[in-house]
Image (spheres, rainbow, N blue to C red):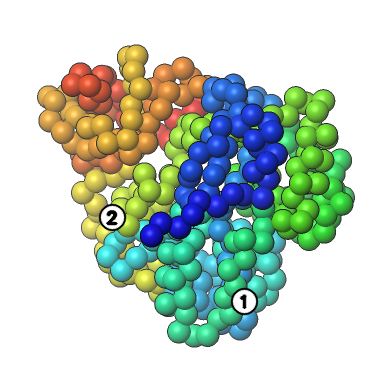
């Protein structure tokens, strides 16, 4: 029997704002409020707020917390200072990825892991299975709301609401303090848009007040609520991976271009096989591409070479609202992965000309 779809804490607020709510990763989520393109441009050019409270949060603590995280994570959490975060993935035992995640070092022996909503139960079970050292684990996914305030005017909106000096928080660092009257809010200089901004981890009881404060402060900047539709095109322009599309249980971090978060200075699950991949090379790579003619690439469309031979598949694709052209990510045979390589994307039995591009696809 399928689990019932959950509602996020501010579901009623989103419905009142006219959001189209759809089932996503086990939750009803706002996919758009008005127009995906308008919401996309609001973030790129101004400021917008995403309610991404469906994301999962685990607290790992105690004297063995770091040991557990080092075992299950591809990145090196020992390099984190208190107040710093890192992007990482959970490798499986067969060369693929259980999930990608953020790791925050809250204090000396306490860490916050932020995981994808669709993988909360899977990730929890995976980490718990490997917790042979007895680290303390707490699943607090249902206790927090998460708001991503993104765009070039994000700091102007946020700073009046807190005494935390936001300009002093480096990228992938965070501070915890009072925000819009709420205590113990984690203010993190992270995001999934490439437009700059912060993410706010807020207790459920404070969520409504913080949301309303954001929009009151942002009114002079025409702040907008932003749905999942724009979130997808924003991350795609930057070449950021989406779990379930660009990275899965069958794709390795080396193939996905995530060697930079795969640190072989320590032992972790399947590190020997992944190290061999890095040393000897892989047969396919995740690449970004742009169409040279009108069309929209979609996931699963074949990627072909100039002779029409299939060399890979699209994993994510869309029209870029910023550039007005079709863009995408996909895996191709490594011989075709070099930027500048001409390829074709098969759309309805027609091959559209495209070019492999270095990430990010959006060039300022």
For disc 1, the neighbor class at 10 Å (few under 14, some 14 to 19, many from 20) is many
Q: Which residue lies under the disc numbered 2? A: 250
Q: Position of residue 323 (x, y in %)?
A: 48, 20
The one of 98 and 190 positioned closer to us in this rendering: 98
> In the shown orientation, is residue 3 left or right of residue 145?
left
Q: Which residue lies under the disc numbered 1? A: 61
Mark drawn on residue 90: none
Q: Is residue 149 visible?
A: no
Kindly identify the residue that appears in the image at 78 percent across and 34 percent down: 215
Q: Position of residue 93 (x, y in %)?
A: 31, 68
Q: Position of residue 64 (x, y in %)?
A: 56, 82
Within the image, what quadrant is residue 222 found in? top right
Q: Quadrant of the N terminus?
A: bottom left
Q: Quadrant of the C terminus?
A: top right
Please say if 119 is above or below 305. Answer: below
> In the shown orientation, is residue 215 left or right of residue 267?
right
Q: Are marks 1 and 2 in contact (CB under 8 Å)?
A: no
Q: CA distance from mark 1 to mark 2?
A: 30 Å
Within the image, what quadrant is residue 230 found in? top right
Please say if 33 is above or below 166. Answer: above
């Amino acid at each position: 029997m399928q689990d019932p779809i959950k509602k996020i804490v501010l579901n009623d607020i989103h419905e009142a704002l006219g959001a189209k709510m759809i089932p996503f990763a086990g939750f009803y989520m706002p996919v758009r409020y008005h127009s995906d393109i308008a919401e996309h441009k609001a973030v790129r050019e101004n400021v917008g707020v995403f309610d991404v409270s469906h994301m999962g949060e685990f607290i790992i603590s105690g004297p063995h917390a770091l040991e557990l995280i080092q075992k299950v994570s591809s990145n090196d959490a020992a390099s984190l200072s208190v107040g710093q975060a890192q992007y990482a993935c959970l490798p499986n035992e067969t060369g693929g990825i259980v999930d990608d995640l953020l790791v925050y070092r809250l204090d000396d022996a306490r860490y916050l892991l932020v995981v994808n909503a669709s993988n909360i139960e899977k990730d929890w079970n995976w980490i718990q299975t490997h917790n042979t050292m007895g680290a303390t684990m707490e699943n607090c996914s249902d206790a927090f709301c998460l708001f991503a305030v993104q765009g070039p005017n994000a700091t102007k909106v946020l700073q009046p609401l807190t005494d935390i000096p936001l300009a002093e928080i480096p990228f992938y660092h965070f501070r915890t303090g009072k925000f819009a009257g709420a205590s113990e809010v984690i203010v993190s200089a992270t995001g999934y848009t490439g437009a700059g901004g912060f993410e706010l981890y807020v207790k459920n009881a404070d969520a409504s007040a913080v949301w309303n404060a954001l929009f009151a402060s942002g009114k002079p900047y025409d702040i907008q609520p932003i749905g999942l539709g724009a979130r997808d095109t924003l991350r795609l322009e930057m070449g950021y991976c989406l779990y379930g599309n660009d990275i899965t249980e069958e794709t390795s971090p080396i193939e996905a271009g995530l060697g930079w978060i795969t640190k072989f200075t320590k032992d972790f699950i399947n590190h020997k096989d992944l190290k061999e991949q890095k040393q000897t090379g892989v047969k396919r790579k995740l690449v970004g591409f742009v169409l040279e003619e009108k069309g929209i690439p979609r996931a699963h469309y074949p990627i072909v070479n100039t002779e029409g031979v299939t060399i890979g598949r699209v994993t994510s694709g869309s029209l870029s609202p910023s550039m007005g052209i079709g863009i995408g990510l996909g895996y191709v045979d490594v011989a075709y992965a070099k930027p500048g390589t001409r390829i074709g994307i098969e759309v309805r039995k027609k091959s559209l000309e495209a070019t492999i591009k270095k990430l990010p696809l959006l060039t300022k």
